[in-house]
């Protein structure tokens, strides 16, 4: 990139405060162009430090100002790389003087924006740390002190890594920053000599800190702080990766999580540093939305203010621009806390830099765009004032001067009159405080509603629940409780809603996170109350899987339902970022449960109906299986080898194959394989073909059904495979074909009408579909189909009678009865269609039934499906209208289009009678 020269980019300059100092520089640089002189004079008239640097580096400055400042800095840093260890200290201090001078002038002249100024200072710090580490490690290798190391190992620090923390990690160094470093080493490079290597790296760290940080006659480079390391009071200055990781996993605190947001490997073994950062991801970025971090950050802010005595009204004199009210740290805390809340779920929010993080938070909907824009402007303005405070005497200060004269100097340094500077600064500080304080400070608890004696008794029992046992959870919940009780009292049946919420609260294993979530997002309380008042079963599910609420806050909870391909790709990407197999399976469970919960909430709230919900549940199951199948195969292949031949495919049967599930559906699956000519797999432990695919199938079933920390995905039923429970769990395509053509019962051909390939080799899926259609066509002319179906219907009626008058699934004229007839129509016609409606339409086209028969069956099927899908969302028990709450009954009546329970009962009886008559008449024709 080509940059314009320094002089051409000047847009502003300070006003000289000290006329004598200004005159001295005016005379010394009188030969320079008139465009540059006011900047130099103004800077010298406000800053003794810059004035001294201009005089000390006058010849170099003249050359540098003729260039673009980017080029001048790059040349200066490049010259350092040729220096030996003996000359490096002097060279670094010379570079610091020159880069500090040029960056200061570029800042004061408006040549560089804030990010360019802090970036140049950070580049210098990176260069200083990297060169110091390399030279010192090379010296230790030369003296034979690092076990097994050769001279080339110095390039990457022989396994030592320096992490730039804080502002250096984010490339945001202020003008007179300390640099915060954490030094670690990769002990895996020293399996037998880690203790010896550790001693060397401790020595290197101390020498590096001195080389960079000690003040000599030539000055210093950067003051160096090593205290951000784990347990700094008792640990050495350089730790092993394992020791650091163990610390963060066991006792790491919220402030340390925030610190590692900005961490960046800046010297040594950068690749090893990147790997270590990845291992810390679960510590820094929590898998669930972490609203408890807000309280932690608020407490931290108050402790800092108490320690520094920074409370009270804003005044200009003595105000701390970093830690005071409305200061820089407020914006940084605001940004980092939001990142900690949501960054675990969205890696786009993990930026190290404050300005880019604010933009990302706005883009993802976590803060309003106008808030991000205004905070960015305020942040840059605050940092400019901070820089001018530090430029005066190269002091690491954030305090405005305590005297009016000192404030007047800063005003002139900013190119403003004293009055304008004071008014603008107060306005910016107050505006920052207004934008950030409401986010951090917990609201005062409002007054709660009057409660009945029964309600008071229920609420009194809450203190004994597991979720409220910790003091912190209790404090947060006491702030949330009044508003929550008010919302519960506004439910259609307040007593029922309170009892249902009580069940939800009792099931919560812990409360800090979810109560913090409620406090930060009051709209969630409305959703919980709605769910509790309508579906106690969903509320109980929610109490055991509170993490699904993250999806509600995440921004896309009410977006349009994605395609099957998008769902599959989403889960695939989620698991791809995880190396451990069991963690992949747990991630799949979290992902599935969030989408499953979304479907239930949308259905409950009337955003979708039972048929849309049925399709979405089926899409979700298919996407889950399709994404999981290759993961399971890859893990299985590590031990037994890749699948021989074309491998195996996963078939969805029953309701899954037909693409319509309810909230409580299990999954009917079959596995079909084609090993080609292979007799054994090719792996560390080869298996014969049948046991290979049998074990692979079992591995998949386990992956889906195993109870893990995040629960299970689905229950699986494989009884629809050839020969049912007596048959092998996986069947070759050739055996399946022979079985279907020669041995299968009619019920197995009926099941085949809904078989649908879900995952696996595309060619094998296509071959199976061709085979399925061939079987259906061949068996369409079977003389006993109707008689077999009639017999099967009788057996089902005996084995699974309706559990009540409200049973929508089992019994004459109900779902299973209609589905059985629909499948018989598809089989008799040799038609590959899978959905009930299409199969019934096939019956009409083939004259197995009349259009009025079809309508009677559809009326019953649609009402029964709405009743079944709705009831399974409400309870996993038999539907009993008398036991349902007001909200649940209202939901079912809305779903079925009826005004009251009596009307629904009459309508159900009417459609079931007509459907039963049609089915009995058609099957009697056998």
Image (cartoon, rainbow, N blue to C red):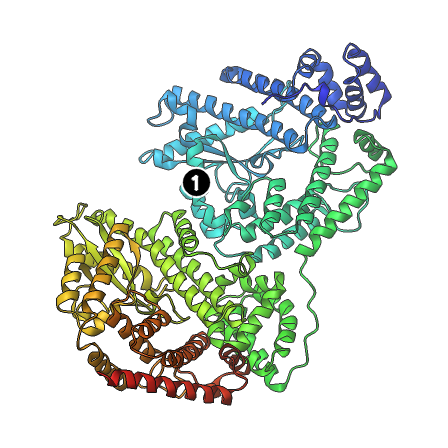
**The C terminus lies in which quarter of the figure?**
bottom left
Q: Position of residue 514 (x, y in %)?
A: 54, 64
Q: Quick check: 345 left or right of 328?
A: left
Give whichever of 128, 36 is nearer the camera: 36
Task: Report the number of numbered marks.
Answer: 1
Residue at (35, 83) in percent of width and height: 813
The kind of secondary structure element at disc 1 is: helix
Give whichever of 398, 63 is nearer the camera: 63
- For residue 501, say whether it is visible: no
- In the displayed structure, would residue 125 be above or below residue 309? above
Q: Quick check: 769 left or right of 444?
A: left
Q: Position of residue 134 (x, y in %)?
A: 46, 24
Quarter of the image holding residue 278? Answer: top left
- Density class for disc 1 (Cα within 10 Å; few <14, some 14-19, many ≥20) is some
Q: Position of residue 19 (x, y in %)?
A: 86, 21
Residue annotated with mark 1: 276
Give whichever of 243, 646 is nearer the camera: 646
Give whichever of 303, 314 is nearer the camera: 314
Q: Quick check: 762 left or right of 342?
A: left
């Amino acid at each position: 990139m080509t940059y314009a020269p320094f002089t051409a980019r000047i847009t502003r300059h300070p006003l000289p405060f000290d006329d004598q100092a200004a005159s001295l520089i005016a005379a010394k640089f009188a030969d320079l162009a008139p465009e540059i002189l006011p900047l130099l004079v103004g800077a010298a008239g406000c800053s003794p430090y810059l004035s001294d640097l201009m005089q000390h580096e006058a010849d170099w400055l003249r050359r540098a100002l003729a260039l673009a400042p980017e080029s001048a800095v790059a040349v200066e840093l490049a010259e350092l790389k040729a220096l030996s260890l003996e000359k490096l200290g002097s060279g670094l201090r010379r570079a610091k003087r020159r880069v500090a001078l040029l960056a200061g002038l570029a800042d004061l002249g408006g040549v560089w924006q804030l990010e360019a100024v802090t970036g140049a200072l950070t580049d210098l710090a990176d260069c200083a740390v990297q060169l110091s580490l390399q030279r010192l490690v090379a010296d230790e290798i030369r003296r034979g002190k690092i076990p097994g190391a050769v001279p080339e190992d110095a390039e990457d620090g022989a396994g030592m890594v320096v992490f730039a923390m804080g502002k250096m990690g984010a490339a945001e160094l202020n003008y007179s920053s300390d640099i915060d470093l954490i030094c670690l080493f990769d002990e895996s490079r020293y399996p037998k000599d880690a203790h010896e290597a550790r001693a060397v790296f401790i020595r290197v760290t101390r020498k590096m800190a001195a080389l960079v940080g000690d003040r000599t006659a030539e000055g210093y480079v950067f003051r160096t702080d090593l205290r951000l390391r784990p347990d700094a009071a008792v640990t050495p200055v350089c730790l092993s990766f394992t020791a650091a990781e163990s610390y963060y996993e066991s006792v790491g605190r919220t402030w340390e999580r925030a610190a590692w947001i900005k961490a960046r490997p800046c010297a040594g073994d950068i690749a090893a540093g990147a790997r270590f950062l990845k291992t810390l991801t679960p510590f820094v970025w929590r898998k669930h939305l972490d609203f408890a971090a807000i309280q932690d950050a608020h407490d931290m802010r108050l402790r800092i203010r108490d320690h520094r005595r920074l409370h009270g009204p804003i005044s200009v004199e003595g105000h701390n621009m970093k830690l005071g009210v409305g200061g820089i740290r407020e914006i940084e805390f605001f940004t980092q806390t939001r990142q900690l809340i949501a960054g675990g779920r969205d890696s786009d929010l993990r930026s190290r830099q404050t300005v880019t993080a604010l933009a990302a938070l706005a883009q993802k909907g976590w803060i309003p765009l106008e808030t991000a824009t205004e905070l960015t402007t305020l942040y840059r303005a605050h940092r400019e004032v901070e820089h001018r405070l530090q430029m005066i005497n190269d002091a690491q200060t954030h305090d405005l001067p305590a005297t009016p004269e000192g404030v007047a100097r800063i005003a002139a340094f900013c190119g403003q009159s004293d009055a304008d500077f004071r008014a603008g600064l107060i306005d910016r500080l107050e505006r920052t405080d207004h934008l950030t304080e409401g986010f951090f400070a917990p609201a005062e608890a409002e007054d709660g509603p009057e409660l009945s004696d029964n309600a008071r008794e229920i609420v009194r029992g809450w203190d004994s629940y597991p979720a409220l046992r910790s003091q912190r959870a209790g404090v947060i919940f006491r702030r949330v409780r009044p508003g929550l009780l008010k919302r519960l009292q506004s439910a259609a049946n307040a007593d029922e809603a309170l009892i249902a919420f009580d069940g939800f609260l009792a099931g919560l294993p812990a409360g800090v996170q979810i109560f913090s979530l409620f406090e930060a997002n009051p709209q969630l309380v409305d959703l919980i109350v709605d769910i509790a008042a309508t579906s106690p079963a969903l509320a109980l599910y929610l109490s055991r899987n509170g993490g699904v609420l993250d999806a509600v806050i995440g921004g896309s909870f009410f977006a349009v339902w994605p395609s099957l391909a998008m769902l599959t790709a989403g889960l695939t990407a989620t698991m791809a970022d995880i190396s451990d197999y069991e963690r992949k399976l747990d991630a799949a469970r979290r992902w599935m449960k969030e989408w499953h919960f979304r479907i239930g909430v949308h259905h409950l709230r009337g955003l979708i109906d039972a048929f849309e919900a049925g399709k979405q549940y089926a899409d979700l199951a298919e996407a889950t299986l399709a994404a999981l199948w290759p993961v399971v195969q890859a893990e299985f292949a590590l031990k037994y080898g890749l699948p021989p031949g074309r491998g195996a495919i996963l078939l969805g049967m029953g309701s899954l194959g037909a693409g319509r599930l309810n909230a409580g559906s299990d999954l009917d699956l079959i596995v079909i394989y084609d090993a080609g000519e292979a007799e054994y797999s090719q792996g560390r432990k080869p298996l014969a073909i049948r046991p290979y695919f049998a074990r692979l199938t079992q591995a998949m079933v386990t992956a889906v059904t195993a109870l893990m920390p995040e629960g299970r995905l689905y229950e699986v039923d494989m009884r629809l495979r050839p020969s049912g429970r007596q048959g092998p769990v996986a069947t070759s395509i050739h055996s399946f074909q022979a079985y279907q053509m020669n041995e299968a019962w009619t019920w197995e051909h009926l099941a085949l009408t809904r078989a649908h390939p879900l995952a696996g080799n595309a060619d094998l899926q296509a071959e199976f579909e061709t085979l399925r259609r061939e079987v259906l066509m061949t068996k369409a002319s079977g003389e006993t189909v109707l008689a077999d179906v009639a017999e099967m219907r009788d057996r089902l009626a005996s084995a699974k009678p309706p559990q009540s008058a409200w049973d929508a699934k089992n019994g004459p004229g109900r779902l299973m009865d209609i589905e059985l007839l629909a499948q018989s129509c598809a089989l008799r016609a040799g038609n590959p269609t899978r959905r009930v409606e299409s199969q019934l339409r096939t019956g009409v086209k083939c004259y197995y039934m009349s259009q009025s028969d079809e309508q009677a069956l559809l009326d019953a099927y649609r009402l029964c499906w709405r009743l079944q899908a709705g009831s399974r969302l409400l309870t996993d028990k038999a539907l009993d209208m008398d036991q349902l709450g007001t909200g649940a009954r209202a939901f079912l009546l809305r779903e079925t289009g009826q005004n009251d329970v009596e009307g629904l009962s009459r309508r159900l009886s009417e459609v079931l009678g007509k459907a039963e008559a049609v089915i009995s008449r058609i099957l009697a024709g056998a």
